[in-house]
Amino acid sequence: MELAVLENEAKAKLDSCHSLDGLEQLRIEYLGRKEGKITHLLRGLGKLPIDARPEAGSQINSLKELITTLFSDKQTAIIANEQNQRLFREKIDVTMTGFIPQVGKRHPITNVLEEIVNIFMGLGFEVEEGPEVEYSHYNFDALNIPQDHPARDMHDTFYISDTVVLRTHTSPVQIRVMQGKNPPLRIIAPGRVYRRDADVSHSPMFHQVEGLLVDEKTTFGELKAVLEAFLVAMFGKDTPVRFRPSFFPFTEPSCEVDIGCVICNRKGCGVCKQTKWLEVLGAGMVDPEVFKGVGYDSEKYIGFAFGLGVERLAMLKYGIDNIRL
Ligand code: DAH
């Protein structure tokens, strides 16, 4: 009677229970140690006549076992179900297109510098480096630019002290290399240089690549060939190249090298100031005074040198008209 009703009632409630919280409520309702309905029945056994107790006791205990088993089965089922739902919610579609993270790019200066270095390495030049904080002796005097030389004014120098400067060009590396090694020499020296100057085409810090070749025999013709080979590799085989006489204290004769304006294709524009040409290099045959200063025999050795601005080449190559960009 009562037990069968209780059993059906418990089964129905279990069926409609879908959460662990609800299950705990039901467990308390039936099996709770104080108020549980089955616990209550077991307690009531004492009120039955003695000979009825074993039979009733075993029936109630069977029901208790049954319900306990049903509860634990239900608990397993609810946990499994909740886990399935969570897995479903958290499932990852590994075939979905991912977010493409923003990554950095190499700076155009780095690219162009590497390109320049590679071209000259292909021509047999080795890379040398020198300090950015330099003695004014190396930056000027040893390059045949004495204290009162007007060329010093052109350099807008940052002075660290009376005798130390931020190098205004990479040419002092020539001196350091010649002091440390004997000819034959074929080097380039890339690096940062500094000048007190800032506008659309000048920046207080910029990059140059210096070149120096010293041997017992070389000619201005070889200098021209090297620079032409470089400019053609850099700007394309149809690039017009022009050598103009110029002056540098550390080379004699000296020249400046122009390429046909790559911005307007030699029609005339703001960048070439309607001249159709762009100056890209300074160069010349090493002045014997410079050789004397480093202890080279200027009768025995001859050399050529050149210097170029990396930002300028990068701007021309990428069509950028403001150095600050
Ligand atoms: N140092 C020069 C400058 O910064 C560039 C230069 C010109 C370097 C002629 C050279 C050279 O080696 O021969 O303006």
Image (spheres, rainbow, N blue to C red):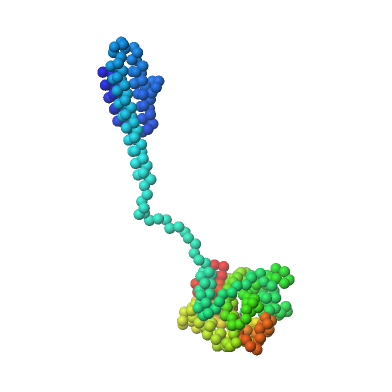
Query: Relative to 83, does residue 234 appear above or below in the rendering?
Result: below
Q: Residue at x 72, y 72 (%)?
A: 163
Residue 26, by quadrant, is: top left
Which quadrant does the N terminus fall into? top left
Q: Residue 100: x, y in percent?
A: 43, 58
Can the viewer see residue 99 in this picture? yes
Q: Is residue 170 left or right of residue 54?
A: right
- Residue drawn where x is 28% and y is 20% of the image: 59
Q: Residue furthest top?
A: 49
Q: Nearer the viewer, residue 116 or 265?
A: 116
For this rendering, which residue is in front, 187 or 231? Answer: 187
Q: Based on the displayed image, in which of its 4 quarters is residue 218 positioned?
A: bottom right
Residue 194 placement, left or right of 10: right
Image quadrant of ligand 1?
bottom right
At horizontal 59% and vertical 85% (from top left) the residue drawn is 215
Quadrant in the picture for the C terminus: bottom right
Q: Is residue 315 visible?
A: no
Give the camera-side residue of 81 and 51. Answer: 51
State which quadrant residue 224 falls in: bottom right
Image position of 119 (left or right of 1): right
Give the total of numbered labels: 0
On the image, the x and y values in percent for residue 78 come to: 34, 35
Horizontal and vertical percent position of residue 34 = 40, 20
Seen in the picture, residue 196 relative to 55 is either above or below; the reply is: below
Q: Which residue is more in the foreground, 175 or 101?
A: 175
